[in-house]
Image (cartoon, grey):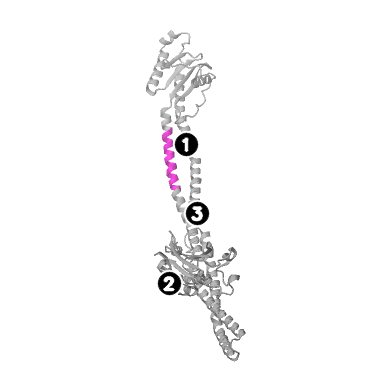
Amino acid sequence: MRTRLLPLLIVLLAAVLLALGIPLAGSVAAAQQQRVVVDRIDDTARFAALAQFVTDGPSGPHRTATDERGETLRSELESYYGVYGIRAGVFYRNGSAMANAPGDWFVPRTGEVRRAFDEALLSRRSHDPRQVWPWQRGWLVVASPVIRDGDVVAVVVTDSPTGQLRSRILRGWLFIGAGEIAAMLLAVGAALRLTGWVLRPVRVLDATTHDIATGRLKSRVAVAGGPPELRRLARSFNEMADNVEAVLEQQRAFVADASHQLRNPLAALLLRIELLALELPEGNEEIASVRTEGKRLAQVLDDLLDLALAEHAEADLVLTDIGALAEERVAAWAPAARTKGVRLTGDCPPTTGWADPIALSSALDAVIDNAVKFTPEEGTVSVTVAADGHTSTVVVTDTGPGLTDEELARVGDRFWRSGRHQNVKGSGLGLSITRALLAAGGGSIDYAHHEPRGLRVTVRVPRQADTGTDAADTAS
C-alpha cells in the first residue's frame, strides 16, 4: 500500500511546488526586466531633456556640428554607449539623426526599434517591451518623445543588449529551482514519515489477520502509534479476536467434553452387549451388527477427541529433515501395504523444513493410510519429497479409484466420505485432523487428480521460520 500511496503524495507535492514555482519564476523574470526598463526610461528622459535645447533642425547638419548643445548631447550618447554598450540616439520625426552612438546606427524601416519610434511619435513613451527569457537572444528597446512647445520634435531611442538581464533571470531561476528541490526533498521525507506512521498499524493488522487465519488465534495487534482511528480499529480487532477465540474455545471444549463423557457410557453399553451376546446363539447377525456399530461409534468419539485436541494444540516448530521423516513413515507402512498387495515406494532426499515432527508424522500416517486403504491389490502408492524456494513438499500419489471434481471440493470436510467408500472402515475425520495439525504449524494439504488414475495429495510445510507473529506482537 505504501508503494501506491507514496507516489501519489509525491506527485501531488510536485504539482503544488510547480504551481507555485512557475508563477514565481515568471515574477522574477518580470521584476528583473522592469528594473532594466525603469533605468532605460530614466536614461531616455535625461537625453530628451538635453535634446530640448538643441535648436538645429534636420535641414542644417553643419549647424548641428557647430552647436555646443548638440555636441554635449552627442558626447553624452557616446559616453553612454562606450560605458554600457547600449545603442542610443535622438532622431527627428523623419528618422534622421540629431545625435547617435554609434554613428552608424539609425532607425530601421521595420522591426522592434521602428515600432517603438512610431509609438513615441504619438507623444507617449513606448509600451513595455515583451518579456525577455533566458533562452532568447535580442535587444530591449525603449523610446521616449522629445517635446518642445507641446509638439514632438524628436524621439530618444535606446536599444539595450539582454545578456546581463538574461543572466540575472537565470540566476534567479536557479535559486528558485534549488529551493524547489530542497522543498521537494523535505516534502518526500515528510511523506515517508507520514505514510509510515499511517500505514504501520495497517501492516501490523494485516500480519495479525494472516496469523489468525492460519490458526494462530492468540495473535493480537499492539495498540500503539498511528492515527486515532486506526488505534480504535486495532482495539476493536483485538476485541473481535478475543470473542472469536472464546467461541472457538467453547466449541472445542464442548466437543472434547462430549467425546470424553460419552466414552464411559459407550464402554458400559458395549460391555452389556457382550454380556447379552453370551445369552444368544453364536453367530447371531444382529448382535454382530450391533457390535460393529458400537465399535464404529467408539472410533468416531476417539477421532472427535483427537480433532478437538489438534485444533487446540499449538505447534512446536523445529527445523526438521522432511525427507528422513517421510522415509521413516514409508518404512512403517510398508508391512501393511505388502499385506494388502500394494507396492509402496518412496523418493525421499534430505530436505529441511519447519514443522512439528509429531504433527507431521501423524499427518503423513493419515495420508499414507488412506492411499493404501483405497488402492486395489497390485496398485502403487508413491511418496516423493521435494523443495522449492519457500516450501518443502511431500507428495503422495496412488493408483486407486480417485475422486470426482465434486468430491475433491469436499474432501477433508468433517464426517464427509465418498458415497462409493461408505463400506470402508473409517469415521471421515482423519483428513480433517490432518489439516488441523498442519495448519497449526503453518502447513497445508491439497488434493488433486493423479493421471492416469488415482489421487494426488500434497503436504506442504514452510522452509523458513515464520516471524510474522513476533513482529505483530512487538510492533508499536
Q: Which mark is residue 25?
A: 1
Q: What amino acid does circle 2 point to?
A: Ala
Q: Which mark is residue 244?
A: none
Q: What amino acid does circle 1 point to?
A: Ala
Magenta segment includes 177: yes
> Left or right of 181: which side holds 300?
right
- According to the image, label 2 marks what residue? 331
In space, the residues marked 2 and 3 are separated at their CA atoms by 49 Å
10 Å crowding of disc 3: few (<14), some (14-19), many (20+): few
Where's residue 82, x and y in %?
37, 21
Where's residue 19, x and y in %?
51, 41
Task: Looking at the picture, tell me which residue is in the foreground, 205 or 349.
Answer: 349
Q: Main secondary structure of the magenta part?
A: helix
Where's residue 97, x and y in %?
46, 14
- According to the image, label 3 marks what residue? 1
**Figure check: 49 above or below 237:** above
Where's residue 220, x and y in %?
49, 66
Magenta highlight range:
169-187
Magenta segment includes 112: no
10 Å crowding of disc 1: few (<14), some (14-19), many (20+): some
Q: Earlier in the sequence, mark 2 or mark 1?
A: 1
Question: Is disc 1 in contact with disc 3, using a CB cutoff of under 8 Å?
Answer: no
Q: What amino acid does circle 3 point to?
A: Met
